[in-house]
Image (cartoon, rainbow, N blue to C red):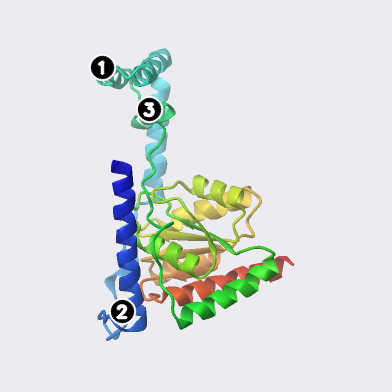
Amino acid sequence: MAAIESAYMKQRLVESNVKRLSGIESGEQTVVGVNAFTEAEPSPLSGSDGSILTVDAKVERDQIEKLKVWRAQRDGASVKKALAELAAAAKEDRNVMPASIACAQAGVTTGEWTDALRGVFGEYRAPTGVARAAGVTDGRLEAARREVDTVSRRLGRRIKILVGKPGLDGHSNGAEQIAVRARDCGMEVVYEGIRLTPQRIVNAALEESVHVVGLSILSGGHVSLVADVLAGLRAAGIGDVPVVVGGIIPPADAAALIAAGVARVYTPKDFDLTQIMRDVTSVVDAAWKEAA
């Protein structure tokens, strides 16, 4: 019952935002700085270096090295035994706290502890609200559908887009709206929700045979996360699948992403979702023509 209620609430939230964004696109709802009175001083989020806090890659590398040293210095047999007891307690529906304390005393890391429990219980994936959410329809949407149909006929099947949320960013509204609008425009949509690893996104792109990958990132980690996805696609032999990215991305970072191979970068000024879908359709068409 709780799962059904959660799915219903998420669906209603997505539908509510669909209506809101549709009103903004049509001009029925005015949002200062978005679809009206857009002249303003430069945003501090799109300025020079330092406008968005980012962590130096060296910090990550140093922390990984410290973790490797920690694992090398602890008693491996004790770690293995503690993790086995943790998994056994979980499988037998016993209190996992004593086993967890033993894991901490043995030097088990948080990731190892979590992986042991995931191996027993699996991983919860929250409902996305996209599949059953009511969309919108208007004249502009019909034009986008015709374009999607035209390109789909060239491809020999319906355009398929993967909407991915890499990293720890928990803001899913933008990705959900892209997924719903892509569906309403006639695309086949693959969307698994938030907090995905780049490798999981790559695997989904490969398994689902998608035509385009759309990444939504608001965490500020767009440069490194997109680079990981691009590298993963190339390693998987599908580096020709175009990637588009949306988020709060400074111009300098947007230029870097384009130089790295990203087909399009969308920022908050690009609020017209139907136009974005038409643009994505043209990206898929261009990729198909280049491959042909």
User: What's the distance in space between the residues labelled 1 and 2, CA to CA?
Assistant: 54 Å
Q: Residue at x 54, y 70 (%)?
A: 280
Disc with the residue nearer the chain's start (1 vs 2): 2
Number of the label disc, if any, that sits on residue 98: 1
**200 or 251, which lies in front?**
200
Q: Give above or below for 156 relative to 117.
A: below
Classify the position of the C terminus by image quarter. Answer: bottom right
| Residue 268 pos. (x, y %) | 36, 72
| Residue 120 pos. (x, y %) | 41, 26
Pointer 3 with pointer 2, Cβ within 8 A: no
Residue 155 lies in quadrant: bottom right
Disc with the residue nearer the chain's start (3 vs 2): 2
Classify the position of the N terminus by image quarter. Answer: top left
User: What's the distance in space between the residues labelled 1 and 3, CA to CA?
Assistant: 14 Å
User: What's the distance in space between the residues labelled 3 and 2, CA to CA?
Assistant: 45 Å
**155 or 19, which lies in front?**
19
Q: What's under tag 1, amino acid-wise?
A: Pro
Q: Secondary structure at mark 3?
A: helix
Residue receiving disc 3 = 117
Q: Give above or below for 278 relative to 223.
A: below
| Residue 107 pos. (x, y %) | 33, 22
Q: What's under tag 3, amino acid-wise?
A: Leu
Residue receiving disc 2 = 34
Q: Residue at x 59, y 64 (%)?
A: 159
Q: Residue at x 32, y 78 (%)?
A: 24
